[in-house]
Image (spheres, rainbow, N blue to C red):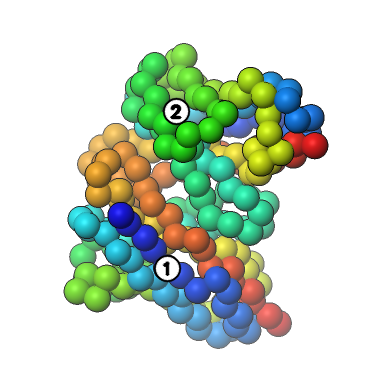
Amino acid sequence: GQSLEQPSEVTAVEGAIVQINCTYQTSGFYGLSWYQQHDGGAPTFLSYNALDGLEETGRFSSFLSRSDSYGYLLLQELQMKDSASYFCAVRDSGATNKLIFGTGTLLAVQP
Amino acid sequence: SQTIHQWPATLVQPVGSPLSLECTVEGTSNPNLYWYRQAAGRGLQLLFYSVGIGQISSEVPQNLSASRPQDRQFILSSKKLLLSDSGFYLCAWREKRAGAFYEQYFGPGTRLTVT
């Protein structure tokens, strides 16, 4: 089967940098994506890595190491509005139409 | 631009009552459609997905069902709700192009409480 592991909670202060890790086990790998979900809201797509390395989008960056089955989301210059849950996801190896989501990491940004 | 609608936003239903949640997408055609459920503080559980009208794949055996009567309409139903059906129900869509595997777009969700 497929599984993804993330820390359940991370706390950081405003202006700092925080890294949210995701390790995965999958029989076939097609890339890693990240979603953000504010409390009570809908998940929104943040980024996608198909190849090894760092992808940067503004204050957010996402990293992938396929050899280590590992990725992370890096948030820089943290703002209070970054307080949210962050989910990593992989494509289901048996069905191209499905995503398998991690259990999510709750990021609390403190002043 | 594309928009996804879900209604109602909140719902309180007694155990044993029926359920119908509706989701519609605008601004795209022939999307893949998805129903997820999220328990409080938990991850996303895929319930159903559809690749076309009348085509439904069920992920979790339970007392819920889904239908896709039109290209951009996805309905989640139950004949008799259970307490365990409480949760946050999210509809999502994605384009069928190969580069869009990882980009799903979610609706605002329906918060269902079964009492």
Label 2 residue SS: loop
Label 1 residue SS: strand
Residue at coordinates 27% horizontally, 41% vertically from top-left? A95
Q: Is residue A107 above or below residue B98?
A: below
Marks 1 and 2 sit apart, C-alpha to C-alpha, by 35 Å
Residue at coordinates 19% horizontally, 74% vertically from top-left? A67
Tell me which chain the residue with mark 2 is part of: B
Residue at coordinates 50% horizontally, 24% vertically from top-left? B66
Q: Amino acid at mark 2?
A: Gly
Disc sitting over residue A5 in the figure: 1
Quadrant assignment for the N terminus of chain A: bottom left
Image x and y of residue A81, in percent? 64, 67
Q: Amino acid at mark 1?
A: Glu
Residue B112 horizontal side relative to residue A76, left or right: right
Residue at coordinates 62% horizontally, 50% vertically from top-left? B39
Image x and y of residue B2, in percent? 46, 34
Tell me which chain the residue with mark 1 is part of: A
Residue that label 2 marks:
B27
* Front one among B59 and B52: B59
Residue A104 horizontal side relative to residue B97, left or right: right
Image x and y of residue B106, in percent? 51, 42
Image x and y of residue A56, in percent? 35, 70
Q: Residue B85 appears in which quarter of the rendering?
A: top right
* Front one among A108 and B88: B88
